[in-house]
């Protein structure tokens, strides 16, 4: 053992009575204070990670009818920044001033702090101070597993449960209102799309009737059926590709600029091929239709009208079903929150943790006492072994006292 350690231990043992008395006084005061401190109860609520609800719908040409109706992807109706999850969004809502103020005003939190009478003429000040106090005893965060954890601490366990339930209710209300607004937007978009599709179907029907009144009904032969089959498939692919590119450009779907350009190039090529087939033209030596050179323009026109009619009829039927689904969604919105641990009585207080406080105070007191005694011992040794250094410090002490005396005289 080194000399410093021996000297330090000797100093502590020499002042053992002082140490024991000091510890006894400090710990007695600490124990008394810990029993005076009011008890706090923390209620913990855990919500499962929210899921992104998928829009149910039919498909046409490999593309969901939700895309035809302009349905947005994402759980809450808006696109999220990079590396942001819906749990992060819920956490921001829980920590928002709007939700906290609503909780304070609907649970009598201001009355529990006795701010109502004190700030009767300044309600905004009472709300500000209550919000400040509420944030000290409230936390909402996302765990490493993606769960949402809510903690509420008050002096009454049942009141903590009440506040927790109110917070969960408000979060569910906000989420429901966002989903409802999203469903309304989707329904309106579907209605607009259906109106456009109905108008296009009426125009196509009128064109077919006009054609048949002029040329009569043409029974499709094998070549015409092949043309109609090719046109139907190409038009379906064209609509799918065009809507997909538009959805990516408008931020409805995720994708890169290269994907958009590729889709637009594909759509342009399909459109050119469809126009060439419908017009009965050829490119070089390659025919763009089965025996199209041998078909009359009337047959080609009739095939075009028939494929347009079939496509518009399919879209109109699918959009009508989609509109019915959107109305059902809008009228039957259920809570999307899934609670793993609901608010319950914690069973035991969370604050103060007396044993931890006693141990911490005891250790800190020992550290301060040891530092004080060791410094005092070193100071006395310095005074005895090096009186010249002590005289310098003593002179400096007298000079400092003289400075204070001069200031007091100047004030007089």
Image: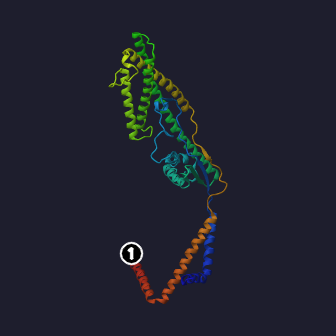
Q: Quadrant of the C terminus?
A: bottom left
Nearer to the camera, 218 or 143: 218
Give x and y (percent) for residue 409: 39, 78
Give x and y (percent) for residue 385: 48, 89
Residue furthest to the right in view is 347
Question: Looking at the rendering, which quadrant does residue 42 occupy?
Answer: bottom right
Q: Is residue 388 visible?
A: yes
Nearer to the camera, 285 or 195: 285
Q: Is residue 115 visible?
A: no
Give x and y (percent) for residue 62: 48, 31
Bin the neighbour count of mark 1 within 10 Å (Cα to Cα): few under 14, some 14-19, many 20 and up.
few
Residue furthest to the front in view is 285
- Residue at image location 48% in from the left, 47% down from the top: 84
Residue 44, placed above or below residue 396: above
Give x and y (percent) for residue 32: 63, 67
Residue 170, placed above or below residue 276: below
Question: Looking at the rendering, which quadrant does residue 227 occupy?
Answer: top left
- 350 to the left or right of 268: right
Give the tally of numbered discs: 1
- Residue at image location 42% in from the left, 81% down from the top: 401
Residue 207, placed above or below residue 23: above
Residue furthest to the left in view is 284
Give the residue number, with chain letter if any, for mark 1: 411
State how the image is colored: rainbow
Classify mark 1: helix, strand or loop.
helix
Nearer to the camera, 366 or 264: 264
Residue 357, placed above or below residue 190: below
Q: Quadrant of the N terminus?
A: bottom right
Nearer to the camera, 128 or 187: 187
């Amino acid at each position: 053992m080194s000399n410093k350690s021996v000297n330090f231990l000797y100093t502590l043992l020499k002042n053992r009575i002082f140490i024991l008395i000091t510890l006894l006084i400090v710990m007695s005061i600490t124990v008394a204070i810990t029993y005076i401190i009011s008890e706090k109860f923390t209620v913990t609520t855990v919500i499962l990670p929210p899921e992104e609800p998928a829009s149910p719908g039919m498909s046409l040409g490999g593309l969901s009818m939700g895309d035809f109706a302009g349905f947005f992807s994402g759980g809450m109706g808006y696109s999220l920044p990079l590396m942001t999850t819906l749990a992060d969004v819920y956490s921001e809502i829980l920590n928002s001033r709007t939700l906290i103020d609503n909780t304070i005003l609907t649970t009598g939190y201001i009355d529990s702090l006795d701010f109502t009478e004190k700030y009767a003429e300044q309600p905004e000040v009472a709300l500000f101070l209550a919000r400040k106090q509420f944030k000290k005893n409230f936390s909402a965060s996302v765990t490493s597993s993606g769960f949402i954890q809510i903690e509420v601490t008050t002096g009454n366990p049942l009141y903590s449960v009440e506040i927790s339930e109110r917070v969960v209710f408000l979060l569910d209300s906000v989420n429901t209102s966002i989903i409802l607004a999203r469903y309304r937007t989707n329904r309106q978009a579907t209605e607009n799309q259906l109106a456009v599709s109905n108008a296009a179907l009426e125009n196509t029907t009128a064109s077919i009737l006009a054609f048949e009144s002029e040329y009569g009904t043409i029974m499709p032969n094998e070549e015409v059926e092949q043309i109609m089959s090719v046109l139907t498939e190409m038009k379906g692919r064209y609509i799918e590709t065009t809507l997909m590119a538009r959805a990516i450009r408008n931020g409805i779907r995720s994708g890169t600029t290269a994907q958009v350009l590729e889709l637009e190039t594909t759509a342009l090529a399909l459109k050119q091929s469809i126009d060439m087939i419908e017009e009965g033209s050829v490119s070089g030596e390659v025919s763009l239709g089965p025996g199209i050179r041998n078909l009359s323009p009337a047959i080609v026109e009739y095939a075009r009208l028939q494929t347009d009619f079939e496509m518009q009829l399919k879209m109109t039927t699918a959009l009508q079903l989609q509109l019915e689904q959107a109305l059902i969604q809008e009228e039957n919105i259920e809570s999307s929150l899934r609670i793993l641990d609901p608010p319950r009585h914690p069973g035991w207080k969370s604050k103060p943790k007396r044993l931890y406080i006693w141990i911490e105070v005891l250790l800190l007191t020992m550290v301060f006492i040891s530092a004080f005694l060791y410094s005092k011992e070193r100071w006395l040794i310095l005074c005895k072994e090096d009186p010249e250094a002590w005289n310098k410090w003593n002179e400096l002490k007298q000079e400092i006292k003289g400075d204070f005396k001069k200031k007091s005289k100047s004030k007089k």
